[in-house]
Image: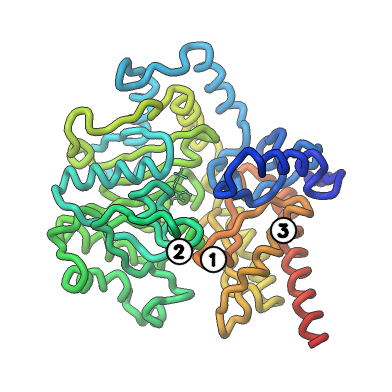
Amino acid sequence: MSTIQLHTEIPGPKSKALHERRSKAVPRGLSHGTPIYVAKAQDAWLEDVDENRYLDFAGGIGCINVGHRRDEVVGAVKDQLDRFLHTCVQVTPYELYIRLAERMNEVTPGKFAKKTVFVNSGAEAVENAVKIARAYTKRPGVIAFEDAFHGRTMMTLALTSKTHPYKAGFAPFPGEVYRVPYAYCYRCSYSLKYPSCDLYCARHLEDTFKRVVANEDVAAVIAEPVLGEGGFVVPPPDYFKVLVDLCHKYGILFIADEVQSGFGRTGALFACERHGIEPDILVTAKSLGGGLPLAAVTGRAEVMDGPGVGGLGGTFAGNPLSCAAALAVLDLFELENLLARADELGAHFQRRAREWQSRWPIVGDVRGLGGMQAIELVQSPESKVPASEETKKITQYCYEHGLITITAGTYSNVIRVLVPLVITKEQMDEALDVLESAIASVCDQKGAVAQLA
Ligand SMILES: Cc1ncc(COP(=O)(O)O)c(C=O)c1O
């Protein structure tokens, strides 16, 4: 039996009514990918207020890797609800926080001594990573990448690349942020080809130290091991090894922002493992909390002790409910074969998407690592002009036919897969059938327009 069940036009009458109330009560700046109002969710599906059931390729933007409302996560939170909700760890600490910090220090890449501090969101964690790097190195500069996304607070907007809608109108941003191209091979900034490029984009950092910012003024290089909002771009083998070695040559810390690529998404607990690197500071959030707000900064013990006593923290940072949920998430990764599942899902997606690529020229690139997969849509494979309008139509077709998807990419022309890793094979095929007919419908419309012209 199919999981997708649609009983009304989409969005249904109750969703539409809520959307009208929303327009009056909530600013337009908060946008929604799909105007469907959720009533409940379980594993890999969502049900809306009109009782329509959808498969979920967004997973709350990569927060639900272990699945919606897993019994283990809900049980751990309920258990904690009966004990205490909030004390503020800076006033009266609790064992859950310490236990989770110990687990994070254990499971993150690198055998060296580590320490972890918890905050509430990915952006807050990135802010703290920068504070820690500056306090430890006593240097101001941070190097970030084109197409990077690190959050919506002021410092993280300075680090984020995409102008619209994230940065436009919100300047001035904090200074001492320098930007260099990422290893986006499909659209190489230097018009080179891997492997003959010899990883020029990574080695070019040395040039940046001569022409842009002095190496002794740089505290950290921050990078996503796989670009998230920037379009699920996976750098080629050894790119990060070259980059990290260069950082260390100049006493610069390497910060890995694994807010989106972390927690099993790429078939390893952290994408850094797949690149064979050990960051000095690792930032995690999203799926760490299994659906509750929680973020972590984990790093070399001596680096993490850079800020003085009282320099880190926050009222709700590392709240007990989120810590309980995160411990359950880590248990689930140990008990269930979710990392292998991420690889299986990714391979299955790639097989289907490569068939689409051979049939429809709009599918310009198919790429990903483990369960972090995407297609980049273009007007033609030769021009690579982003097919942004068509991408919008495809996601709309998808939700109207029972599949929640989200886009990515600087040109909003990438459809990404952040499906809960517990999706069954039948559900995955059902979802991919919807995506396939969405692409077909847009390509057929385009064909019809071309014929008329
Ligand atoms: C790589 C990366 N860093 C940071 C953030 C910001 O996280 P948050 O929205 O929890 O502040 C995001 C959010 O999508 C992200 O993908």
Residue count near mark 3 (Cα–Cα under 10 Å), binned few <14, some 14–19, many ≥20: some
Asked which secondary structure carries label 2, the reply is loop
User: Which residue is found at the position 22% from the left and 47% from the top?
Assistant: 133
Residue for badge 1: 367
User: Which residue is found at the position 57% from the left and 78% from the top?
Assistant: 385
Q: Are marks 1 and 3 in contact (CB under 8 Å)?
A: no
Residue 134: image tag:
none
The alpha-carbon separation of the residues under discs 2 and 3 comes to 26 Å
Q: Nearer the viewer, residue 266 or 29?
A: 29
Going by the numbered disc 1, the residue's amino acid type is Arg
Asked which secondary structure carries label 1, the reply is strand
Which quarter of the picture shows residue 420?
top right
Of pointers 1 and 3, the one earlier in the residue sequence: 1
Going by the numbered disc 3, the residue's amino acid type is Gln
Q: Where does residue 21 sit, x and y in percent of width and height? A: 70, 39
The alpha-carbon separation of the residues under discs 1 and 3 comes to 22 Å
Q: Are marks 2 and 1 in contact (CB under 8 Å)?
A: yes
The alpha-carbon separation of the residues under discs 2 and 1 comes to 7 Å
Q: Where does residue 379 sit, x and y in percent of width and height? A: 63, 78
Give the farthest residue toward the right.
7
Of pointers 2 and 1, the one earlier in the residue sequence: 2
Asked which secondary structure carries label 3, the reply is helix
Q: Nearer the viewer, residue 127 or 185?
A: 127
Residue 396: image tag:
3
Q: Quadrant of the N terminus?
A: top right
